[in-house]
Amino acid sequence: MAREIVITGRAYQRAATLSVTGATLTWRATRGADQPENIATTVHDVRDVTWLEKRWSLGAVLLAVLSVVWMYEGPPYIGVALLLVAAGLGLWRWLHPRYWLGLDLGERWLVLRVEDSAADAARTLSQRVRRQLVTGEVPAIPPTLP
């Protein structure tokens, strides 16, 4: 029996999980107030995969631009202070990126904002799906879905 790996995160602004057991994927999320969403599929049914590691901060970029304008137009010490804050925000985001996993099932996309603790498992899953898409491998025995 294959070991189960659970990727945790958020979908639809609520807690969600993606369980991986062998080639079987089980998506559990809540859509809306009372609409549970349970989808079972296999790695071989995924048509595309997207893995994003967002390591930049729009707020830090805007604050840096504002600081440069402030140094030119006003007292430079305020601009320098804003530039240091922008650098701190940018460094923090670089060290603590946001992770996103997207799976295209044909009729819908499953998008999960992955928690930091599950990022390695999600990255490995995306590489596995990408490799399966490139090689076109098909299972010797089609897996049974739960």
Image (cartoon, rainbow, N blue to C red):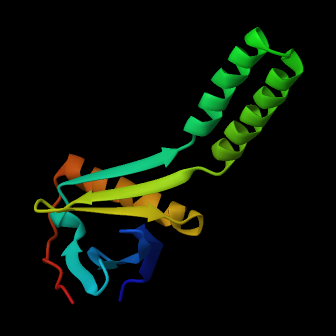
What's the residue at 74%, 18% (across, down)? Answer: 70
Q: Where's residue 62, x and y in %?
A: 60, 29
In this rendering, the answer to whether 5 lies above or below 93 is below
Numbered marks: total? 0
Of residue 74 and residue 103, the one placed in the foreground of this image is 74
Q: Is residue 32 left or right of residue 68?
A: left
Q: Quadrant of the N terminus?
A: bottom left
Q: Residue at x 13, y 77 (%)?
A: 142
In the picture, measured across the screen, residue 101 lies left or right of residue 106, that is right
Taking the view exactly as shown, the residue that stands out farthest to the top is 72
- Front residue of 135 and 86: 86
Residue that sits furthest to the right in the current view: 77
Q: Nearer the viewer, residue 97 or 76?
A: 76
39 versus 86 height, above or below: below
The answer to whether residue 92 shows anywhere in this view is: yes
Which quarter of the figure is the C terminus placed in? bottom left
* Image location of residue 131, percent across then percent down: 29, 51
- In this rendering, the answer to whether 135 lies above or below 61 is below
Residue 2 found in image quarter: bottom left
Q: Quadrant of residue 83?
A: top right
- Furthest residue toward front: 74
Which residue is drawn at the image coordinates 38% and 68% (left, top)? 11
Position in image of residue 140 (x %, y %): 14, 72
Instruction: Please provide percent x and percent y for residue 36.
Output: 27, 85
Q: Residue at x 18, y 85 (%)?
A: 145
In this rendering, the answer to whether 34 lies above or below 73 is below
Instruction: Please indicate, yes or no, whether residue 21 appears anywhere in the rendered image.
Output: no
- The answer to whether residue 106 is left or right of residue 22 is left
Tell me the quarter of the picture where residue 113 sits. bottom left
Q: Is residue 4 left or right of residue 95?
A: left
